[in-house]
Image (tube, rainbow, N blue to C red):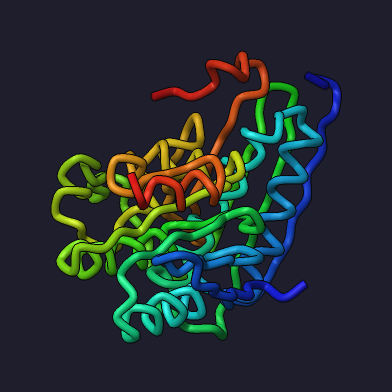
Amino acid sequence: MAELTIHAVQKDSAKILYPDGYINAHTVQEFEKSLQSILEEKNFRIIINCRDLQYINSSGLGVLMGVIEEIQENEGFLWLSNMNETVFNIFDTLGFTHLFNVYQTEEEAIGAITQ
Amino acid sequence: MNDLQTGKVEVTFPSQTEFVHMITVLASNAATVAGFDKKQAGKVAIATDEAVTNVIRHAYGGRSDKIINFTVEITPKSLILKVSHTGKALKKNEIRLPVMEEYIKKKQPGGLGLFIIDKFMDEVDYLAGEEHCCLMTKYRNMDQSGAEKK
């Protein structure tokens, strides 16, 4: 398996990102590039489905922090779903669940868009 | 928990980010051997990733031609992880962990690694000497449901 692959799919009004692998200092540029290319297309409604994400470290969280302001300024959102225990622990411990909505499933996240 | 399993593994690797994941897998496996559950093993892996990344980025300033020593030791009481290097020493009294509420309010990237290490391990020390090191300990005899110190 590659260290990190990311593919993106448009669903309803949101862009869904599927990172597969791990996000750390070695792979964070790939993650940042993916997010930036979505923002350059003026997509500010983003859901990251973490079902195949093994873990994310502070480098990856730094990327999320770096883009959230631009997303919020454009009335968008950056939500996450399908986190494993390790990924959720990091978000929870750092209090990032107050900054990023976290959903159990992608369907729940998509459903929340229309609410 | 298996209190009898003890042992020590030592690895030397180049200061390149390609090797970080390999070391985190080793740390996670060692935690499992020491009897920690998946949740705690995940925390050990992340803390190790952060400690090694700090050495590459800050102690060695991103240089890829340096050496890092990683030791993981399972003792009867604890899992001890040691990340050693000969770069710039991190002095414990100079460490200022971020206050997360303020950090999130200001949305400033960076500075989270040391905070994660501190939260996910039971004890963390930064020692300076011939080799400098980050010494991280997780105790085996703690109730895993209440193992977090904070």
Does residue B68 appear left or right of residue B25 in this picture? left
| Left or right: where A74 falls relative to A99 | left
Camera sees residue A68: yes
Q: Is residue B109 positioned above or below A33 on the image?
A: above
- Which image quadrant is residue A70 in? bottom left
Residue at screen point 42% across, 58% down:
A58
Q: Is residue A26 visible?
A: no
Q: Position of residue B140 (x, y in %)?
A: 67, 23
B51 relative position to A67: left or right:
right
Percent of width and height locating residue B30 = 75, 42
Q: Is residue B80 left or right of residue B5?
A: left
User: Where's residue B32, x and y in %?
Assistant: 77, 36
Image quadrant in which the N terminus of chain B is located: top right
Query: Which residue does the image show at 35% across and 59% down from the upper left?
Result: A78
* Count of numbered circles on the image: 0
Q: Depth check: give the residue in front, A52 or B104.
A: A52
> What residue appears at the point 76 percent right and 31 percent down from the top-left corner?
B34
Q: Is residue B93 above or below residue B62?
A: above
Locate the C terminus of chain B by quadrant. top left
> Where residue A29 sits: x, y (%)?
47, 79
What residue do we see at 18% from left, 69% from top? A74
